[in-house]
Image: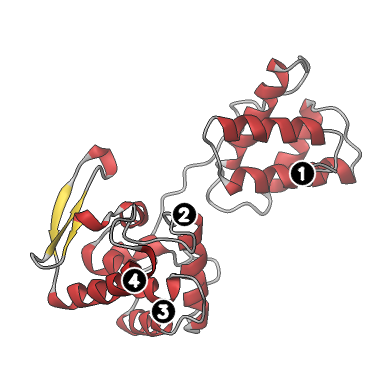
Amino acid sequence: MNRHGFTSAFAAQLDAYLDFKTAMGFYGASRIWYLHKLDDFCTRHNRTRFDQATVEEWVSQQLTHSGEFRSWMSYIRDFGRWLQVHGDHDAYVLSPAWKAQFVPAHPYLLTEAEIDRFFAAAAGMATTSPWRWQAVAFFTLMHSCGLRTGEVRQLEPIHIHLREGYLDVMGAKGNRSRRLPLTDAVIAVLESCEQITARRFGHDRGTFFVSSTGRPVTASTVGVMFNRIWDRAGLPRPEGGQRPRPHDFRH
């Protein structure tokens, strides 16, 4: 057993690999989650060689219940390369023939009733984190201003000009910036959020929306909170269709 909880014959290498990625600035939980899946497979099947049979059998099994996003293949391919560089010259690097299939995204179009129920549930969030008062403002910016998740997360207090009635989105997709007008209703929501956040974390914090530690909120947390609010509102999750996600508010 190691500090990441791996149990297979590759535990030490997986641990060292993740330390290397962290040192390079890659902290994604998704990578760790899929490597744990691979580690569990190798433990259950007593695999001790990172060869083609082992890797491709696991990938084949994973594909039977994988969704439309398959970036996890790059994690397995990268780990194989890392093993080769660090002495295991026989380690298998997943062939480029195994690649994520392009699946065009179709947004989930929310009805007015679903939007009303979502924001009612967001306003009544039972949590001790800043999401209790930030959730409505965060998703309002996506719904009313068409901001992307990352754009909302990166907003700084100096970018939001409530008296003047606009906000500046800096360094957005394609490294483009833009200025957006704010309605009176959106301004009221943001003012209420800012009053509470400023009392607890100050006006000179790094970002407008913060975590419990005062740091910027993470992308994964946004998804978790969206799903929690969606379920709290009692909204349906379509079977066999596009699942609702935060990005859908932009549509």
Q: Kindly report the distance in space between the C-alpha atoms of the residues bearing marks 1 and 3.
A: 36 Å
Q: Label 4 near label 3: C-beta < 8 Å?
A: no
Q: Residue at x 54, y 66 (%)?
A: 240
Q: Which residue is mark 2?
A: 218
Task: Determine the image quadrant of residue 55.
Answer: top right
Q: Residue at x 25, y 38 (%)?
A: 175
Residue type at the position of mark 3? Ala
Q: Label 3 near label 1: C-beta < 8 Å?
A: no
Quadrant that contains the N terminus: top right
Where disc 3 sits, the SS reads helix
Q: Kindly report the distance in space between the C-alpha atoms of the residues bearing marks 4 and 2.
A: 22 Å
Q: Is residue 7 above or below residue 110?
A: above
Q: Which residue is mark 1?
A: 3
- Counting residues from the N terminus, which is met first, the one under dot 1 or under dot 2? 1
Q: Kindly report the distance in space between the C-alpha atoms of the residues bearing marks 3 and 4.
A: 21 Å
- Counting residues from the N terminus, which is met first, the one under dot 4 or under dot 2? 4
Percent x, y for residue 76? 66, 34
- Counting residues from the N terminus, which is met first, the one under dot 2 or under dot 3? 3
User: Between tags 4 and 2, which lies in front?
Assistant: 4
- Density class for disc 4 (Cα within 10 Å; few <14, some 14-19, many ≥20) is few
Quadrant that contains the C terminus: bottom left
Residue type at the position of mark 1? Arg
Q: Kindly report the distance in space between the C-alpha atoms of the residues bearing marks 1 and 2.
A: 23 Å
User: Between tags 1 and 2, which lies in front?
Assistant: 1
Percent x, y for residue 12? 80, 32
